[in-house]
Amino acid sequence: MPVRPYKSKDQLFKHHHTVWLNDSQEADFQKQLVKSNLKKSDFLRALVIHGFVQAVPRQEERKQYIELFKLLLEYKTHFARISGLIKSKDQSLFSAVKTLVDSIGRHLDSLTRL
């Protein structure tokens, strides 16, 4: 029998609640549970405490996010270099490219919060 790690008294789960669902509610619950990629207890705990459940990205989704992040970072770097080259020659084009760089930066920030 595996040894469970020691938990302090405030970390022990002491309360148990039962919820009754009809068939359609159970089907919806199971769909959301699978979509979240969490265990049932973790899903319910997050739902009760936070009011919503943040789905854990699957491995292939993580790879896609990483590739997208790398691509956007590369584009941001290239456009920042371009804006530096045209800074003194064409101010309107410089401001347009700078706006694009800032927009890509905001998208990168939103990806890091996922």
Image: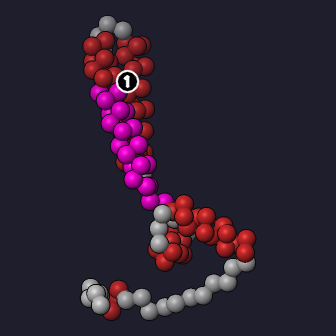
The local secondary structure at tag 1 comes to helix
Q: Is residue 5 a member of the stretch shown in magenta?
A: no
* Rendered position, 31 above or below 8: above
Specify the quadrant that holds the N terminus: bottom left
> 68 above or below 51?
above
Whether the magenta-drawn stretch holds residue 63 is answered as: yes
Q: Nearer the viewer, residue 95 or 51?
A: 51
Which residue is at a point 42% across and 26% down the rendered structure image? 100
Q: Residue at x 72, y 75 (%)?
A: 23
In percent of width and height, residue 65 lies at 40, 44
Residue 78 x %, y %: 30, 23
Amino acid marked by disc 1 = Lys
Q: Is residue 52 visible?
A: no
* Left or right: 56 in relation to 34: left
In the visual, does 104 lie left or right of 32? left
Magenta segment boundaries in residue numbering: 54-77
